[in-house]
Amino acid sequence: MTQTNVYSMKGEVSGTIDVPAAFSAQYRPDIIKKAVLAAAANARQPYGSAPRAGMRHSVSTWGKGRGVSRVQRLKDGRKATQSPNNVSGRRAHPPKVEKIWAQKVNRKELAIARASALAATGSADSVKARGHRFDDSLSFPIVVEDEFQNLSATSEISGVLDVIGVGYDLERAKDGRKIRAGRGKMRNRRYRTPVSVLIVVSERDAPVFKGAANLPGVEVEAVGSLSAGLLAPGGDAGRLAVYTRSAMAKIGEWTQ
């Protein structure tokens, strides 16, 4: 069985641990992409225009012989309206609330996608190909002692990640935070931040959840809540992930 190093709070190798069999799953980028896109589609909120938007006018047509286009015009004026080709007219094909965005994926495919995305986090080549930066001397998957999940200060968490060898990726995410192009900057998503480290812990109530909230691009998740969307954001496998020792023990209990 393959083994990996366990790093202490000072960045030193404090021991080794057996890598769970879940990290040897077959790499299936097609199923990962399918599962991630389906999850994104299921999270969408239906939207659409009012059924009678652009049609709330009293209109008539003037007919021929006036030297103007034969379109609907306001009865109390001459302004053209209501038709899709007119200013203030209705939209030709507006989005409809009744459109069904949901996508279904087989349970076995979701399990394969999660296992495959998890295995990709244990491959240094896959993580580097995704664009993450880290110390080349690191052993994958990256495992730290359980004391790490008890840290609640952002500076302490950042310091441990730095001495381990993944601080380069924190800097990449911090420097890559840019103002979003387009209308999104006016819709409460002004900035776009690159995806950085995923910290995987064993329990949902660990203090590290609060401490890591201020680190750009960093997410914390419990083992039981892992999904293909977290392990492979956007459907691109190979996210830089840091596991606690107890989290690795729980992953060892997984059955596909």
Image: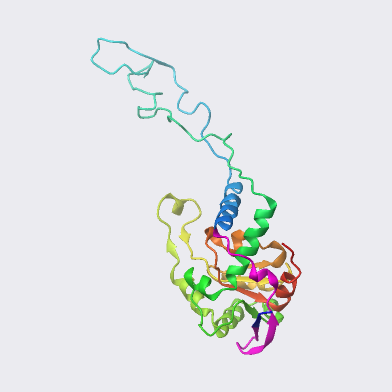
Identity of the residue drawn at 61% across and 65% down? 26
- In the depicted view, which residue is nearer to us: 5 or 26? 26
Residue 145 placement (x, y as % from top left): 69, 82
Residue 175 visible in the snapshot? yes
Residue 140 placement (x, y as % from top left): 59, 78
Instruction: Give, as a single range, the part of the protein colored magenta.
Output: 5-29
- In the depicted view, which residue is nearer to us: 46 or 207? 46
Q: Does residue 230 appear left or right of residue 75 in this picture?
A: right
Residue 182 placement (x, y as % from top left): 40, 51
Of the 4 image quadrants, the one containing the C terminus is bottom right
Residue 188 in magenta? no
Of the 4 image quadrants, the one containing the N terminus is bottom right
**Image quadrant in which you'd find residue 58:** top left
Please identify the residue farthest to the left as the structure is shown: 67
Identity of the residue drawn at 49% across and 64% down? 193
Q: Does residue 195 appear left or right of residue 254 in this picture?
A: left
Residue 209 visible in the snapshot? no
Residue 10 in magenta? yes
